[in-house]
Image (cartoon, grey):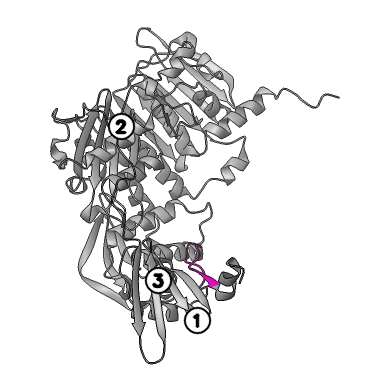
Amino acid sequence: MNRIKILPETIVGKISAGEVVERPASVVKELIENSIDAGANSISIYIKEFGIAEIKVIDDGEGIPSEDVILAFQRHATSKIKDEKDLQRISSLGFRGEALYSIANVSKLKIITQYKNEDTGTESYLIGGDLVSQKPVVTKGTTVEITDLFFNTPVRRKFLKSSYTEKAHIIETVQNYCLAYPEISFSLFIDGEEILNIPQVKTLYDRISQVFGLGFTEKLKFKTISKGKYKIELFLGLEELLRKSRGRQLIFVNRRPVKDFSIVNTIYKAFHINQNHPQFFIFINLPPEEVDFNVHPAKKEVRFRDSRIIHQLILRMNEYQFKSSMIAEEKTQWKINERINGDLSSISQIPVFYTESIFNKEEIFQFFSIGDAIVVIQRTDGIVFLDFHAAHERVNFEKILNKMSEQIVKLTFPHVINLNPQDYILIKENLHILNELGIEAEDFGENSIVIRALPEIIKYIDIAGMIENIALTLKEGTSTPDFIEIKRKIAATIACHSSLRANEKINYFEIKALLQELERTSDPEHCPHGRPVRKFISLEEIKKWFLR
């Protein structure tokens, strides 16, 4: 009896869809990429019920020839790749030939398209990847309408997050392509409400201003550097745009939004960022044959032929003064013609060893500071490694959790916070949670909220940064949000903002008070995020190391 079998096409399609179509935002991403590849100047996106009921994308691109419409829904059908050599120099966004095939297999899909050189177009309707009807039409560009997403894969629906989380992912996806393609106009409507209306502009600076507001963009610093066919443009938010946790850190490689933590780390090294987190947009352009986007089915990751060039150029950026981002598009750039031998380890380090001894009549207490947030405390029976930031987080977390609704302070001047559209949707739909936590907040319109009162314990922290991080917490929420769990996560976020930071000097009295408060918490061994707070090594164990 044969145990190895060829899978039916229906199962193959659903497996492929599982790799490419993770959530409604994945569908939006793939359809926008198709529109961009079709040469669209204008792209409109319409969403109903966070994408489950409907996703409609309309563009004014060149359209699909009638004879190719059905071919477009076959697996590995693409107009972007002709031979194996093309895989080495990919310049289009959609090239794997899986997007439409995968989307069609888990939805009911209608496409209305007309090729620019034809007198009539085609309207096709597919259910679960099977063609149901097809007829000629007269139209312009292409409209793809997805309804009843995941209707035949109900398990996938169960894994989706809350409605506002899925909407936030959709907004984030559209924002990313807005940033990468300032020459294209974008509009986004969710349940009839206009979320984005972004007309064409000429510069990256103008596009960032459209999406995030001029007030935010004016605080960004700009640098650009080039070497041969490599060019990097960096908009970097320092000083008042620093946050206590990672916020907007967007990387674009040849206009694709990607994830690459090594690039993030190099930016931190280049600008000596040891505390708090900058907000930045980095646009990297290089020859297509020097980068491989064929690493991940959803093209989220990249592989560089020589990543050292990228990292060395970023490191060299700090050798020059910042330009105002207002002149981000000037032709004058720094040219690096000499050979670069950048050393990633050449950045100055934090002092590793700091000691302080306290002598009094009753005890001898000594501690050593190692790294940026760890202290080693000497005791008569051994030593304790303490992460003082994590310890302070635990203490503050329980204070905040237990006292958030107490001692509410009315602000003399209400604080208006401008948010990007993604964060605004998340916060607006969860204002009741903020109010139950003692943060008196209201919708102020135009992607803004107004804070009128705060709990006493958090009134001095960075309110805007806190709200942005609360939005991030909500975005990562579950499909069935639980108020108690969300309250705990938000309290943990606020505790992080109000705790001692890495690199801060801490003295004997602060450590002693911190340890005393830590012992009174419900879990002195872990921070609110679950990381360990301390590690004790007994003197007996240390002696065993040396066979004593």
Label 1 crowd bin: few (<14), some (14–19), many (20+), radius 10 Å = few
| Picture coordinates of residue 281, whole percent (x, y) | 29, 40
Nearer to the camera, 465 or 99: 465
Say whether residue 305 is left or right of residue 532: left
The alpha-carbon separation of the residues under discs 2 and 1 comes to 55 Å
Q: Is residue 221 magenta?
A: no
Residue 370 versus residue 145 in the image, above or below:
below
Rendered image: mark on residue 284: 2
- Majority secondary structure in the magenta region: loop
Which residue is at a point 23% across and 41% down the rendered structure image? 235
The alpha-carbon separation of the residues under discs 3 and 1 comes to 24 Å
Residue numbers of the magenta segment = 525-537
Residue type at mark 1 is Thr
Label 3 crowd bin: few (<14), some (14–19), many (20+), radius 10 Å = many
Earlier residue among tags 3 and 1: 1
Furthest residue to the right?
1
The alpha-carbon separation of the residues under discs 2 and 3 comes to 39 Å
Earlier residue among tags 2 and 3: 2
Residue type at mark 3 is His
Q: Does the residue at mark 2 contact the one at mark 3 (Cβ under 8 Å)?
A: no
Look at mark 1 in the image and give the residue it sits on. Answer: 380
- Secondary structure under tag 2 reads strand
- Secondary structure under tag 3 reads helix
